[in-house]
Image (cartoon, helix red, strand yellow):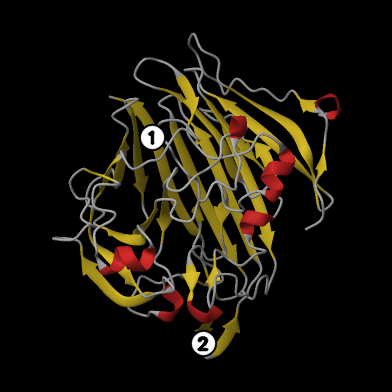
Amino acid sequence: MKKAVVLSVMAIIVLTLAVSCNQKGKGRAEVTKELQGTHKGKDVYLFTLTNKQGNVLKLSSFGARIVWIEVPDREGKKDNITFGFDTFEGMINGDPYFGSVVGRYANRIAKGKFTLDGVEYTLTLNNGPNSLHGGPGGWHSVVWEGEIVKNSQYPSVKFTYHSPDMEEGYPGNMHVEATYTWTDNNEIIIDYTCTTDKKTVLNITNHAYFNLHGAGNGDILDHELVIKASRFVAVDSTLIPTGELRQVAGTPFDFTTPHTVGERINEPYDQLILGKGYDHTFVLDNVEEVDATVYDPLTGRFMEVITDQPGIQFYCGNFLNGTRIGYGGKPYTYRSGLCLETGHFPDSPNHPDFPSTVLNPGETFTSRTVYRFSVK
């Protein structure tokens, strides 16, 4: 990877594109945009969204990623609760997925192969025998175009990317949009829109890590989790679906009622052993508005996840090992963050009985995911 150019504070060009978002009230909602640096000859911008509560969401055009979510605890103390890095160079060279938009196909595709209309496509292998998260040159690793959304009710930024035909082996020129909106209710609304000029497959998500204690402040094993899913996708030793959608009832995967992440994680259950913990897609019941919740009894922070997608990947940081140094010099250690990635199931192109991930020319894929933060 070409070495990133790190700009000094004096060299940062601050674009004072603050917008009022047409809101009334005591607080001022705004978005600012500033140059972070350059990557592979393209400028990378940092967007800071502040809602009327004074809470802050920061986004980078590198990977269209979330790099900072600052929300209060029950005492009103604010802290950042998502993973990121102190410097631009740290972000470019750090974990590729922290907070990023992932595509063209999030999660794994077995042996990096799938077939459409009798044509076999071969993808880049980057996860043992499989392709993961769109390959090493996937959407997490590119610079997106970013613009402040004008006349929005709340602070909002739209990122766009043109994914060329056969990028990482995927057919079709695809136009991708990911729009983030930061509401006064501390909701991150992510709206995705995708079109293609050739039949292809698509699974898009956001790969933010959360620690409601504050990023880098211990592990997430005491976080209380609810996932409204009566089944999950069973996997093999390479985390590829076996085809079984297993009932959660009577297993450590039953989060239909609250359980802490760590309560059953060390049980000698086959899927926990294969995944080295939780690293599985849950088949959402999609009955109620809220599909998953996370509660931190220590701080009182509460997160709700709402999606129109059929699944949610719950990953609890099994492969974090402390080598990534985050904000304030704090290492991201084993199980110090969790992900709830909304989307389709892994390896769906090779499982015709799974919900389809095919996108045809003339069709428009749209999807919305909401992460809502509060206290209790």
Return the residue nearer the eye: 192 or 224.
224
Label 1: how many Cα within 10 Å (few below 14, some 14–19, many 20+):
some
- Residue at disc 2, secondary structure: loop
Q: Is residue 106 left or right of residue 171?
A: left
Q: Is residue 179 left or right of residue 148?
A: left
Return the residue nearer the eye: 246 or 178.
246
Q: Which residue is mark 1?
A: 372
**Residue 329, position as x, y percentages in the image:** 61, 33
The quarter of the rendered structure image containing the N terminus is bottom right
The quarter of the rendered structure image containing the C terminus is top left
**Residue 319, position as x, y percentages in the image:** 48, 56
Disc 1 residue type? Arg
Disc 2 residue type? Asp
- In the displayed structure, would residue 86 be above or below residue 177? above
Looking at the image, is mark 2 or mark 1 earlier in the sequence? 2
Q: Is residue 274 left or right of residue 231?
A: right
Q: Which residue is mark 2?
A: 117
Q: Residue at x 47, y 17 (%)?
A: 53
Label 2: how many Cα within 10 Å (few below 14, some 14–19, many 20+):
few
